[in-house]
Amino acid sequence: MSPLLYVAQRGTAVILAVAVAVHLGTILYAVRGGLTAGEILGRTQGNLAFLLFYGTFVVAAAIHAPIGLRSILREWTPWRGRSLDGAMLGVAALLVVLGLRAALAVYVA
Amino acid sequence: MNAPVPNAAPRDPTVEPAAGAMLTVRIRRDDGFQTFTLARRPAQTILDVVTAIQREQDPTLAYRFACRVGMCGSCAMMVNGRPRWTCRTRVAAVAEGDALTLEPLRNLPVVKDLAVDMEPFFTKWTAAHGAFEPGETPLGDFAVVAPDSPERRAVDAGIECINCGVCYAACDVVSWNPDYLGPAALNRAWTLINDVRDQGREARLDAVSGDAGCQSCHTHMSCTEHCPKALAPTFAIAGLKRETARTALRRFGARHFRRSA
């Protein structure tokens, strides 16, 4: 892993540590409060803070996960080189597209 | 920092083997394990054991040693699954009952029996720019190095490495990634990064970065746990991670921002 990838992974880990805690806290609050899906969507719809939070969360995860996955694959399989790096860029793109699509869907629903 | 070998003394130095006690030693040889039996003796070291076996039972047994007093680092091997200096490890400290299992150092190719080829270890030491780089022209004057400066302290913490290969054998990352430079080479690089006289800093930081470099360390601390000199290569590697990250960010900033400013 290059030093810049190392910095990117550690930096996004800091963001994820906060984001995951807020995310889990929100889930617990919503479930314990007995909110219905409609009531949850009512709170998220058009809520720019919600979109910015989950947008940041998604981008951080999309940077963080492929870097770690690349290291694991290099250690446990013989996969190396440009094909591996390309595949990890693909994983990052997939996470961004799926994650932002989900966040947008809840925002505009 | 360089404390005596912490686990070399017997668990209870007053306990000596009973008269007539025998030791069963399994030794990995080229065609599998071979078992030897010999008498236990007071203050007997693992090196005493293999020497006795070679002299009295099987002169074809291959192993390596030189100084016998913990200075040269050439007698290291796996003792009951842990890498150790055999000259500084007493049988009483490590025998499981009256049994020992001896194997060549892990992560290195075997030459014969208990002797390994150290070439990959030293090739990586060189690849990590382990040699002092004086630069094109010598410094104009003597470098003044304050003994209590942070750089000098960082050097002191790792400078006593004698390249015995124990940390390299203990490292799981080396076993997963044969390209990984390993704790000793990275520790050496860290001592030179902190040497104010050295002129090879930038190239050395490049050499210790990447998939074979310091960023691949998992911080398992096996190297630090097993180092017979009580050094802490893990912290040297952590220092390299910080320094390579700082340098990469500085270069990134210079490349993408200062030019347009």
Image: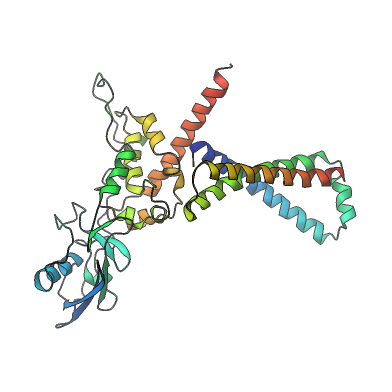
Residue A10, located in which quarter of the rendered image? top right
Residue at the spot 53% in from the left edge and 28% down from the top edge: B252
What is the residue that sits farthest to the left in this orientation? B55
Instruction: Give x and y (percent) for residue A75.
Output: 47, 53
Residue B142, located in which quarter of the rendered image? top left
Instruction: Give x and y (percent) for residue A90.
Output: 63, 43
Closer to the camera in the image, A105 or B152 = A105
Residue at the spot 20% in from the left edge and 77% down from the top edge: B23
Residue B74 vs A59, above or below: the answer is: below
Instruction: Give x and y (percent) for residue B153.
Output: 33, 39
Closer to the camera in the image, A82 or B128 = A82
Residue B52 vs A19, above or below: the answer is: below
Q: How is the image coloured?
A: rainbow
Visible residue check, residue A54: no
Residue at the spot 24% in from the left edge and 53% down from the top edge: B117
B100 lies left or right of B245? left
Residue B191 vs A25, above or below: the answer is: above
Residue at the spot 60% in from the left edge and 48% down from the top edge: A65
Instruction: Give x and y (percent) for residue A70.
Output: 54, 48
Closer to the camera in the image, A83 or B244 = A83
What is the residue that sits farthest to the bottom in this orientation? B20
What is the residue that sits farthest to the front in this orientation? A83
Residue B174 vs B28, above or below: the answer is: above
Residue B19, located in which quarter of the rendered image? bottom left
A67 lies left or right of B203? right
Closer to the camera in the image, B186 or B113 = B113
Q: How many marks?
A: 0
Where's the C terminus of chain B, which quadrant? top right
Visible residue check, residue A83: yes
